[in-house]
Amino acid sequence: MMYDIELKSVSKTYIGSDEAAVNNINLTVEKGSIVTLLGPSGSGKSTTLRLIAGFERANSGQITLAGKVVSDQSKWIPPEKRGIGMVFQDYALFPHLNVFDNIGFGYKEKDRKQRIMEVIELVNLKGYEKRYPNELSGGQQQRVALARALTRRPVVVLLDEPFSNLDTDLKNQMRIEVKRIIKEAEATAVFVSHDQKDALSISDKIVVMDEGTIQQIGTPRQIYQYPKNRFVANFVGQSNLLKGRVDTEDNTVETRIGIINCNTIDGGFDNKEEVLVSIRPDSFIMDHKGKLKGNIKELSYTGEAIEVVLEVQTPNNKKHNLLIRVSPDKVIHIGEEIKFNIIPNFVSVIKKE
Amino acid sequence: MMYDIELKSVSKTYIGSDEAAVNNINLTVEKGSIVTLLGPSGSGKSTTLRLIAGFERANSGQITLAGKVVSDQSKWIPPEKRGIGMVFQDYALFPHLNVFDNIGFGYKEKDRKQRIMEVIELVNLKGYEKRYPNELSGGQQQRVALARALTRRPVVVLLDEPFSNLDTDLKNQMRIEVKRIIKEAEATAVFVSHDQKDALSISDKIVVMDEGTIQQIGTPRQIYQYPKNRFVANFVGQSNLLKGRVDTEDNTVETRIGIINCNTIDGGFDNKEEVLVSIRPDSFIMDHKGKLKGNIKELSYTGEAIEVVLEVQTPNNKKHNLLIRVSPDKVIHIGEEIKFNIIPNFVSVIKKE
Amino acid sequence: GNESEEVDTLVIYSNRNDRFVSNLLEKFTEDTGIEVSPLHGANPLQIVEEQNNVRADIFISNDLGALGYLHSQGLLKEAQVEGIDSIPSDFRSEDNSYFAISVRARGLIYNKDLISYEEMPKSNEDLLDSKWSDVENGYAITRGGNGGMIGHISALRYEWGDEKTSDWIQAIRENAAGIYQGHGDIRRAVGAGEHSFGLVNNYYFHQQLLETSNNNVGFVYLDQEDDQMGAIANAAGLGLVNNGPNGENALKFIEWVLLPENQVEFVGESLELLINSQYNANYPDVVQDQIVPFQDLKVQNMSITELGNYFEDTTALIEQSGLALDLR
Amino acid sequence: MFIKKFNKGIVYFLKMKWISIWKSNPPGMVLLLLSSAIALVMAIPILYVVYRSFFAGTDKWRRLIDGSIPGLLWNTISLTVIVMIFSVIIGVLLAWLIVRTDIPFKRTLKWLLALPLLVPPYVGAVTYIIFFGRSGWLQAAWTNNSFLSTLIGDYPVDIYSFWGVSFVLIMFTYPYVYLIVSASLKKMNRNYEEAAQSLGMNRFQIFRKVILPSLRPSIGAGAILVSLYVLSDFGAIAMMRYVTFTAAIYFQRTSFDTESAAVLSLVLIALTLIILWIESRSKKSNKYYQNSNSYRRPMVLKLGKWKWPATVFAIFIFTVSVVLPIMVLIYWSIIGIGMGAVNSRFFAYAFNSLRVATVVSVLCMLASMPVVYLKMRYPSVITRVIDRLSYAGYALPGVIVALGFVFVFNNFIPALYGTFYIVAIALIVRFLPQAMQSGESALSMLSPKIDEAARSLGYPPWKVMFKVVLPNMLPGVLAGGALVFVSSIKELPATLLLRPPGFDTLAIRIYVEASEAIYHLAAPAALLIIMVSIIPLKFMLDKY
Ligand SMILES: Nc1ncnc2c1ncn2[C@@H]1O[C@H](COP(=O)(O)OP(=O)(O)OP(=O)(O)O)[C@@H](O)[C@H]1O
Ligand SMILES: Nc1ncnc2c1ncn2[C@@H]1O[C@H](COP(=O)(O)OP(=O)(O)OP(=O)(O)O)[C@@H](O)[C@H]1O
Ligand SMILES: [Fe+3]
Ligand SMILES: [Mg+2]
Ligand SMILES: [Mg+2]
């Protein structure tokens, strides 16, 4: 297997700070794939990206780009020689150059004009060549930034929160477009984001980070359906976390609200081990023959679904709040009692720390 | 019925511009309710709000606040005398005043201290009184801005895109909180937003605007389930629009992909009239006995759902793309053929313009 | 209240170096109790500009031409005071509205280390010759706009007519190695050996003698032979401003300044010559030795009070010949 | 009845017209009248010059156009261009070294290099004459050193030359460029450099292709300040025996030729306008903006082997432009103090200087606020006119400002003429724009939404101005005031022409004594001016 990016035990502590911003990270990215670093603010996403780009120097570990070591204890290749393309959060378009010259900045081959026009076409900006950055909309600026990063046919394109300045509509649109452009250009891309929707919809692989360490690596579906730990469960999408006792034979977990079926339980749990179970709001299916029931305490209509806070009576007569997502065509009211079942697809078992 | 805000045929054209920013708007807001102006950029939302606040002067029409005319051809009450509270997009906190003084700005009654503490408690900022705006997080600033607008017990609170600077997590949280605070303060509130999720989840009533005119007024559910025209259908949530011929007797519409059942068809369509039918992606239910079938062309996993672009074969052998939303627990692949039915809850019939 | 204020003050505009004037004014205050409000470095034009709103009572000028100009504009007032007869009539206007007290003669200061008296030019005519550009380090003149230079050129016009005068201006403009803003710069430069000689007023020679170094200088009074025109003179004096706010004090000042001891004080540190040399201005010893009393000089015969009439055409001529704004 | 209705109609029409001029947001009358009055005062000099040059007659015009104008144009323009170019080079280089490299003694050098701003250029000129002149210190050292004089020959420096004047002016004007460019270098977002780096550019290419272009607006602004200064300088140029328009105007006046002075002034104003026009054009075509929410501090470059050459360069500039003049001043001050130069008269001059500078800077701060507030919050045609007029004094030499004042006040407001106030007002006209610029940049950071917030909380506009706008503008306005203080304490030409009898300032004394070469009297005054200005300068630098 060919990796375009490889990080081996990379750590980075900023001068003047006690804690490592990035702590012993191992990461491989396959050629042609899109990877997203996802995590809360300060988790070390930008630092990882900047280590790959060469704007920061790792304290230890090795970084390989397209099979070539670019950084380890003895070797250091500066950013301008790494053959990367970078898209910055605020695009960092050169305000004194027009679209054409921004995109062609630093490209000096003979086919300059032709290549620039090619890239302009790729990002759908034909006719805008003569405009200056301040004459472009946010989405257009974004595309210029992307085009500029692609002109030199980089091995790797790095994007640091490229969508965070856009409003929702534009963001949805850009997500699809950027994905198309990157795939068309056959580039390998690493995104940084703290927005899970960005991450889930654009990536082949997601790297969830927290406090400088990698929490989980997986496909969007793996991450969402089977979060490996409490942090991932909470950070990626909403989740109900319940304490329970696992039964590895039945594939069930016994919790205060009842016995919950799981699809698979991997990861070496002992039978009867105390665990946490994470149940996504999507796991609850309203069913008037359902085994569980509860009272609607709050509801909020989001168009695509109704998010409901449900108060469930536990067997030992205590109360427990669950967040469930109900199909928007149901007509329900606060105070109403509903019955439901839990489908096992969005249930995952997590080690209790 | 008592209206707190009433706009009668209000129009406003900015100097130097040909088109009206707000065009002959009629709007009433009931006491104690939350209304959201929703629309794309440049649709006149902010202008409407600023007309109500008195920061702009209408060219014609009448504005009434709490039964008192504040603006018409002959009358003009400046903003400072209208008894409104306003929350600005970037909060506009006074940088030279601390939280306490920001919140108490302009409030000079005898119970000043007590009232400020009351409002501070309402927005959960106890202990932050002595901080300056630059020492607060975005969410805290937002709450100060809200508290400041509420201190004087205004008839009406106006909020211009108060969430647009927040990141997703904080936004979700603030939406719920702001709603609670406004309801607790028993204020009448007008929001401006271009984010449909904001609008749907916070409002009692939504006013959809485009190009200075009101497109539809209704509850969130009305707007989402029964968009009145093509613009609303497209702008609020995603939608599939198909041409068809209505059958008012059967409550069906005949389209190129087949006959589609609707819940209700109101709004005086003639039998066999040419119409548009809007089908939300949520309307499609996968069902292996379904009457319709198509091939999966693209799919994008958003965690809460899988959005699928489906290529449907029409009876006369043409192809048509549909956007459908599939439950995230389904395992599907590009190229696969799936069968489905359409449930009528999210189908609405629209006049063909 | 108003009355008593008027008694107390006197406003004097002066365009003489204020070191020459300050002691005089202080003495006046001491003698009479009248406070003086001086404006040093005042431009005569200021009197013109202020004619609707007169503030000055007395204008002390370094150059009688300026007073003549003000007189011609009708801005000075007749002053019939005691002691005015001590000034020779050539040195005061007919109505006595302005008069001179000290005089200076134009001539050449030279550096004895670089050039000897014999080698020096002796007349204005000599300067028409371009050979003087060849003396060691060249010679120095002032800018055409300098008051002393304007007076000098007016006198030449009176003597020679415009054409020859114009030639003369162009000759010195081309041949001079330095064109300076004022005479003070010239005497210092010549003293330091930056030029062999320079065209100045004689009191600058006197001042240079007082320097602790660079004082090996001599002076040539021009055109002293019998067939020559005589040294061009200019004078410093004062005029009574029309409608000044403190008219009475102004008259008191004029009477006071005409007292012999005060005429001596007027010369003061300037080291100029007294018109009335019999009053015995007191010079430091080094200077005293070199003083040539005014009466002993052959002086060009144009009345100094006539300078004002020549003023406008002279400046035009200077401008045409190109010396107006040059500095070198 | 009908007429009444008709009148009502007209009133209504006018009211609507008025509202539409102001884009439906008319300012309060008090604010408008105040600003208009200030603008009117500021416009006096230009109105005067235009009025006066009408009376010059074609004859005079022709004579000047054929005679002195071409030479003066050449003198003035060549000097302006040379000084501007070198000031920009030195200013940008120093700013870059201080802000963006690891040059040693950074913090100290940072503000030492701004000190030449405090040395009045005519004082600088004199000290250079004393040091480099034909019979100066260096010449003496040279002739005494037989090695040098035999090897190279005669003392080669001629300070009274084109290059001499240029050198003096460059040394005392480069701080304008240095300060402005430093400020914007500091604000530059690191992302641009990283973007260029990710596109394969090395350090040098980045400097040339990214940093330099984005500094263009601030280099432009600095160059403008320098050129306007050179155009308007009188003292240094007169000391150096060079003649530009400003000097010529002054000389023409001493030769009683007011009309010629007016004509020359008009040409000078035209020259100034051309420069300002060029600047505004280059500004328009390059709207630079940076995204502030992703701002990251710029990177600091390691100088490596260039460290010592760079340090030597910075210290050299500091030595020549600050140490050397101050050394000369101290030498002569000691002699002067020994001879009793610091007497009661000296203190009277010092008091006058402080009084003028203080009054002027306070008044400038006060006057700038309504004008700036009007400009930023109530844009309209009227506002634009008021704003442009308010900048008139900035572009005019002090001589012209003073001449305009002499004329206008003598004829129309004689009561103020010949008082301390006229001097103060003239200096306000000259320096108000400095306060305005500071105030503007402070106010531009305050969102108009803040005003609206205050109004929505029940404050009428005038109260908003005092309670909200003022406190937030204050630091900027104070920095502007500090700049005005530094400028007005060394102001020469306007004070010279307008001061009342018995009123001299340190600046005037320096000029008078120095032009008579009585250095021991001039030096203590000059030293005092510099020392007094250090405090406001420090304050201003902290704000930059
Ligand atoms: N230049 C720096 N010097 C010192 N500490 C730094 C620097 N840059 C980042 N850090 C620290 O390193 C940690 C990781 O920062 P990083 O920028 O990688 O986070 P991030 O995941 O990109 O966060 P965000 O979503 O807010 O951009 C944080 O604690 C941050 O404060
Ligand atoms: N001060 C102004 N002068 C001239 N035109 C203006 C002004 N303010 C707004 N407009 C124009 O009026 C129209 C409506 O603007 P408005 O600000 O109300 O839109 P909006 O719905 O709030 O949009 P957004 O979501 O971008 O804030 C737009 O076409 C806009 O360009
Ligand atoms: Fe003299
Ligand atoms: Mg980051
Ligand atoms: Mg808006």
Image (cartoon, coloured by chain):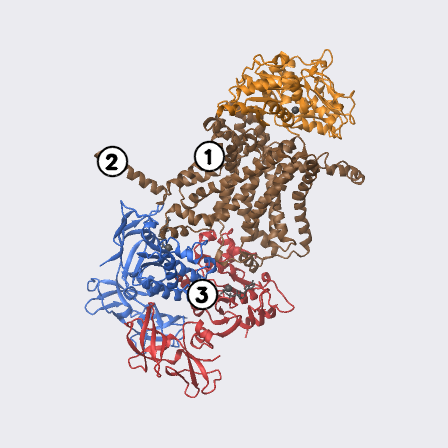
Chain colours: A red, B blue, C orange, D brown
* Residue C79 visible in the current orientation: yes
Q: Is residue C147 left or right of residue A114?
A: right
Q: Is residue A347 left or right of residue C31?
A: left
The answer for which chain carries disc 1 is: D
C22 up-or-down from A283: above or below: above
Say which residue label 1 marks.
D41
In the depicted view, which residue is nearer to us: B190 or C314? Answer: B190
Tell me if the residue at label 3 has its CB under 8 Å from ligand 4: no
Q: Is residue D90 left or right of residue B27?
A: right
Q: Residue at x 61, y 70 (%)?
A: A60
Q: Which of the 4 image quadrants contains residue D134?
A: top right
Q: Label 1 is placed on what type of residue?
A: Val
The answer for which chain carries disc 3 is: A
Residue D422, given in percent of the width and then of the height, sits at 51, 32
D4 up-or-down from D301: above or below: above
Say which residue label 2 marks.
D6
Task: State the separation of the CA atoms marked 1 and 3.
Answer: 63 Å
Per the image, label 1 sits on a secondary structure element best described as helix
Q: Label 2 is placed on what type of residue?
A: Phe
Mark 1 or mark 2, earlier in chain: 2
> Are the residues flagged by discs 1 and 3 from a single subunit?
no
Circle nearer the viewer, 1 or 2: 1
Say which residue label 3 marks.
A180
In the depicted view, which residue is nearer to us: C112 or C115? Answer: C112
Crowding around mark 1 (Cα neighbors within 10 Å: few <14, some 14 to 19, many 20+) is some
3 and 2 marks in contact (CB < 8 Å): no
1 and 3 marks in contact (CB < 8 Å): no
Task: State the separation of the CA atoms marked 3 and 2.
Answer: 67 Å
Q: Quadrant of the N terminus of chain A?
A: bottom right
> Are the residues flagged by discs 1 and 2 from a single subunit?
yes
